Image: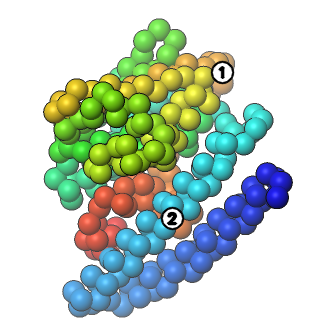
Amino acid sequence: MERSSLDQGTARTAAELRLQLAQMTAVSQVLGRSAQDEKSKRYLAALDQSICRMLRIVGRLELTDRLGEEGPDRLEPAPVDLAELVRKLGERSGSLLACLEVELDVRAPDRLDARVDEGLIRQMLMELISNGAKAGRHVAVTLSRQGGRAVFTVEDDGPGVEPERLEHLFNSAEEAVPDWRRSGVGVAIARRVAELHEGTLVASCAPGKGLQAVASIPLGAGEEELFKTPTVAWDRGGFDEELVALSDLLPAQAFGPDDG
């Protein structure tokens, strides 16, 4: 079978899955309006948790397919204030990770304009934050400018990775990575996003001292254009994007009707 046929099949499958998930979400929302007792709310929370996790899987499938395509359409660059993007992402993600007693610390300058694919940069950061939250109780995200580049640093206080295993962090050879660090596809996606922006993503650590992932990307052109402040993005299933991205970590309570 030709590659183009496989790609079309993947796209159709993902679209059908999204349609079914949208129907499940609609039913959940209707049931949520009439749920009064705690038992019903717990069941609905578990249902929404499963929907979000499936949306995450479908999203990764679509994204992996997109990042593997040939041609210039893989990126949709536009002027973005990266500092505002990081702050908003950190605010929402931090409140969700608090359910796990994980502290998220975000540091960014007042403003840092760049020309990037906003959705992909957000996805890159969410994958790195999720990876850090699997390992430790404190995750720090720092955005800085170094010359003509934006530098994103994501650090955690987890147990770290042995040097001989570090090289496997960015591929799907998950059997070579400790259980708590088995993100495989996620960090591979993060590195691919950096590469598509003509940047790099590297990791360093010492056993027992956590892991540090550093993504460096050019700020890009387009200074003559009007810069925009990114707005909160929502998954097409109706769930908050950060909720979907962290759904494999969060407890069912985070998806309850009373938690938004």
Instruction: Give the mark nearest the N terminus, 1 or 2.
Output: 2
Is disc 1 surrounded by few (<14), some (14 to 19) or many (20+) residues within 10 Å? some
Judging from the image, the colouring scheme is rainbow
- Residue 3 in the image: state x and y as whole percent: 79, 51
- Residue 70 in the image: state x and y as whole percent: 76, 38
The quarter of the picture where the N terminus appears is bottom right
Instruction: Judge by depth and name the residue closer to the eye, 3 or 61.
Output: 3
Residue 22 sits in which quadrant? Answer: bottom right
Give the number of the disc on residue 222. Answer: 1
Residue 119 sits in which quadrant? Answer: top right
- Residue 59 in the image: state x and y as whole percent: 55, 57
Q: In this rendering, is residue 61 above or below 41?
A: above
Image check: 124 left or right of 258? Answer: right
Q: In this rendering, is residue 255 above or below 62?
A: below
Instruction: Judge by depth and name the residue closer to the eye, 170 or 255.
Output: 170
Q: Residue at x 41, y 47 (%)?
A: 174
Q: Residue at x 28, y 55 (%)?
A: 96
Residue 213 visible in the displayed image: no
Q: Which residue is mark 2?
A: 55
Q: In this rendering, is residue 51 above or below 72?
A: below
- Residue 193 in the image: state x and y as whole percent: 55, 35
Local SS, label 1: loop
Instruction: Judge by depth and name the residue closer to the eye, 9 or 116.
Output: 9
Q: Residue at x 47, y 22 (%)?
A: 216
| Amino acid type of the residue tagged 1 in the rendering | Gly
Local SS, label 2: helix
Q: Residue furthest top?
A: 147
